[in-house]
Image: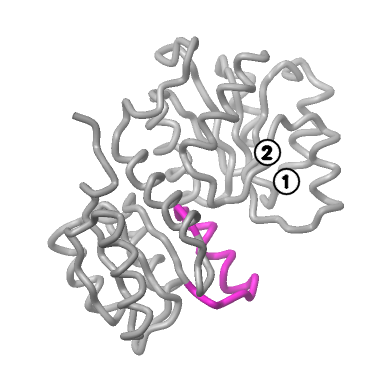
Amino acid sequence: MSLQIQDLTVLLIEPSTTQSKIICQVLQEEGITKLDVLTSGQQALDALSTSQPDLVISSMYFSDMNAIELLRIIRNQPLSQDINFMLISSETSFSKIDPIKQAGVLAVLPKPFDRRDFRTALKAARDTLEVTNLPLDNLDVDNLKGLIVDDSKTARRHIARMLNSCGIEHCLQAENGLEAIDLLHQENIDFMIIDYNMPEMNGQELAEYLSKSEFSYLPVLMITSEANSSRLSGVRQAGVCALFDKTIDPASLKRALGSALNDD
């Protein structure tokens, strides 16, 4: 029997009693009953040291730390490094939100949030937990080999997990464009997923290089938190198949990847 949303175990970290009640009510309406509610970062870390829920839903600010600090610790702990994480916050500053996205999260939702976006994030959490849930139709995924290019180790690991949920187990990783080019000359790669902001050679420079090289046939998807539309326009002109925000969900990645590979 396949995993359902109501089967998820959830840890909510929210210091506001009002916000906590709102989120708990929505979760209960989705059928989720395995729910723990905490109010501080340290309480969350203590809980995660003994058990791992399917999804952590967090506010941005607590009395003892913020979500950036919390997520950094979580991603550096072997037991919790791959845990699904969703931020719900009224914070809009790029300098605060971007580190969260770079750490690999399912969603960043505002307060108040859209119920449909909330449910999409719950579905994404379910999809990452069930490898057979998102098969790529008409493709021999056993023989597919992808290359993930991102300077964030946690972001690479998050993308790899989503690819695993599509049945793709062979995922090589590179920290920047130059390292990726070296791997392309050593391995038979079927597709690439790249970040925009990277040292040495950024995503646009890499995409432009690929479009003029012997690797121009490769489907390239870009996942980025870059918001500058003029920069992203240059990326599209370089032949990138699809552009996504860092909080892309597994189902959307599967559709884009399936389209890119079937068109290849």
Q: Which quadrant is home to the N terminus?
A: top left
Residue 79 appears in the rendering: no
* Closer to the camera in the image, 97 or 215: 97
Callout 2 crowding tier (Cα within 10 Å): few <14, some 14–19, many ≥20 = many
Type of amino acid under label 2: Gly
Q: Secondary structure at mark 1?
A: loop
Identity, as a three-letter code, of the amino acid under mark 1: Asn
Relative to residue 144, is residue 133 drawn left or right?
left
Q: Quadrant of residue 57?
A: bottom left
Q: Is residue 88 magenta?
A: no
- Residue 164: x and y in percent read 39, 31
Image side of residue 70 versus residue 217, left or right:
left
Q: Are discs 2 and 1 less than 8 Å apart at CB?
A: yes
In the depicted structure, whether residue 137 falls above or below residue 73: above
Cα distance between the residues tagged 2 and 1: 6 Å
Query: Magenta residues, as a range?
Result: 89-107
Residue 95, magenta (yes or no): yes
Of residues 3 and 49, which is closer to you in this image? 3
In the rendered image, is residue 123 in sight? yes
| Dot 1 crowding, Cα within 10 Å, few <14, some 14–19, many 20+ | some
Q: For mark 1, what is the residue?
A: 202
Which of pointers 2 and 1 lies earlier in the amino acid sequence? 2
In the figure, is residue 237 to the left or right of 18? right
At x 59% / y 39%, what residue is drawn?
149
* Residue at 36% from the left image edge and 38% from the top image edge: 127
Q: Is residue 214 above or below residue 172?
A: above
Q: Quadrant of residue 56?
A: bottom left
Front residue of this view, candidates 152 and 5: 5
Q: Is residue 163 above or below residue 81?
A: above
Which of the labelled discs sits on residue 177, or is there none? Answer: 2
Residue at screen point 56% across, 22% down: 258
Q: Indicate the position of residue 68 as horizontal and vertical percent values.
A: 46, 71
